[in-house]
Image (tube, grey):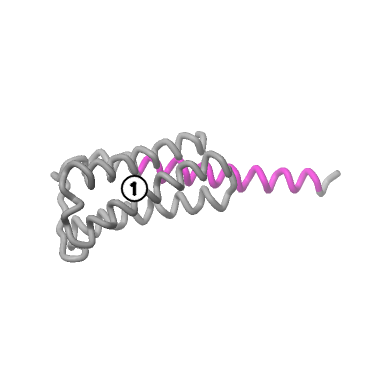
Amino acid sequence: MSISAGALLLLATSYIHWHLWDSLGYRHVPTIGWLFLAQSISGLVLAFAIVFVRELWIVLIGTGFVASTLAGFLLSVSHGLFGFQDSWLAPYARTAFVVEIAAFITLGTGALLIYFDARATNEVRRAN
């Protein structure tokens, strides 16, 4: 798996949140509207940073970002968040959830691969 694939998935979820904010009325939901916009912009920046920086720390930030987006959605569906109750039946809810799970798995796997590759490289250097 490639961290570029994880970055593309992060870009996809950012676009979904942008679309929900821009076209489907989430911009008018108090507090949640601004969070959707912030998620969209932050995800876009992180996706490009992951592709161009390609360091463990930025991949970990991307993984944590996707995890927090998932947690926010699950909290919003189960208990409500900032006075807003979301639903699995909301537009793109299931699509965003699947994309975010895939992004989390892909970026998390990428982070592990970067970590173990760096560790193996250091062990080879010490052996020489």
Q: Compared with residue 112, is residue 82 higher up or lower down, i.e. above or below? A: below
Query: Which residue in the structure is indicated by mark 1?
Result: 40
Residue 85 position within the rendered picture, expressed as x and y whole percent measured from the top left: 15, 58
30 horizontally vs 126: left or right: left
Observer-nearest residue: 27 or 93?
A: 27
Mark 1 neighbour class, 10 Å CA radius: few under 14, some 14 to 19, many 20 or more: many
Residue 93 position within the rendered picture, expressed as x and y whole percent measured from the top left: 21, 44
User: Looking at the image, which residue is at 25% across and 55% down?
Assistant: 74
Observer-nearest residue: 70 or 126?
A: 70
> Which quarter of the picture shows residue 11?
top left
Observer-nearest residue: 85 or 49?
A: 49
90 horizontally vs 68: left or right: left
Quadrant containing the C terminus in the rendered view: top right
User: Looking at the image, which residue is at 28% across and 41% down?
Assistant: 16
Q: Compared with residue 1, is residue 31 higher up or lower down, i.e. above or below? A: below
Outermost residue on the right side: it is 128
Does 123 appear in magenta?
yes
Q: Secondary structure at mark 1?
A: helix
Please state which amino acid type lies under the numbered disc 1: Ser
Residue 112 position within the rendered picture, expressed as x and y whole percent measured from the top left: 55, 46
Does 10 appear in magenta?
no
25 horizontally vs 117: left or right: left
User: Looking at the image, which residue is at 21% across and 40% down?
Assistant: 92
Name the magenta segment's main secondary structure.
helix
55 horizontally vs 109: left or right: right
Residue 115 position within the rendered picture, expressed as x and y whole percent measured from the top left: 61, 48
User: Looking at the image, which residue is at 15% across and 50% down?
Assistant: 87
Numbered-mark total: 1
Q: Compared with residue 12, is residue 81 higher up or lower down, i.e. above or below? A: below
The magenta span reads: 101-125
> Which quarter of the picture shows residue 38?
bottom left
